[in-house]
Amino acid sequence: MSYVTAIEVSAAGMSAQKARLEAAALNLANMNTSSPPGAEGYRPVAAVIRATPKSFAGALSLHERGRVIARASLAPQAGSGVRTVYEPGHPHADEHGMVAFPMIDHTREMLTVMSALRAYEANLAVLQAMKTLAAKALEIGSR
């Protein structure tokens, strides 16, 4: 494995963990966001990480065959419901005094934040190790 490949893999991992962190942060920020009756409120999002070829030409060439990179994007979570809370004085309350909030589990989102941070730090450590390795190789080569 070349230095560049290791750095690309580490950078792709950091990008994927950044997307997971962004999704969890969005969900936590909008956890108590209500919506008027009849309107669609905030829908929780999740990071979707896919392995894709670096390029179409790269996927066809023999030199880069099998080399893929992770791409991350945010997508609405499937099956996310709403939780209703009885608050008759709330401006978004329906005729029964119920207010709709997105169904977001605070504990699960915080666990996602913590695991994404740890994975990001691990990828950063790999990146630092590769940088040190490359510097030592240059130092040995210059002697």
Image (cartoon, rainbow, N blue to C red):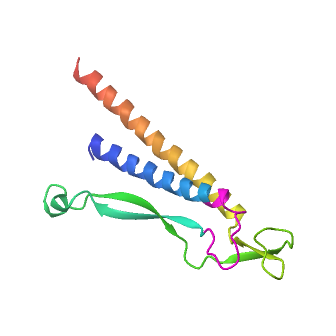
Residue 129 location, quadrant? top left
38 in relation to 104, above or below: below
| Residue that appears at 49% across and 55% down | 19
On screen, residue 30 versus residue 142, left or right, reads right
| Residue that appears at 34% across and 43% down | 7
| Count of numbered labels shown in the rendering | 0
On screen, residue 111 versus residue 118, left or right, reads right
> 87 or 110: which is nearer to us?
87
Which quadrant, please, contains the C terminus?
top left
101 in relation to 1, above or below: below
Magenta span includes 129: no
| Residue that appears at 15% across and 55% down | 63
Q: Which residues are magenta?
A: 27-42
| Residue that appears at 13% across and 59% down | 62
> 66 or 77: which is nearer to us?
77
x, y (%) of residue 18? 50, 51
Residue 77 location, quadrant? bottom right
Residue extending farthest top: 143
> 65 or 39: which is nearer to us?
39
Q: Main secondary structure of the magenta part?
A: loop
Residue 55 location, quadrant? bottom left
x, y (%) of residue 123? 46, 46
x, y (%) of residue 111? 65, 58
Magenta span includes 30: yes
23 in relation to 78, above or below: above
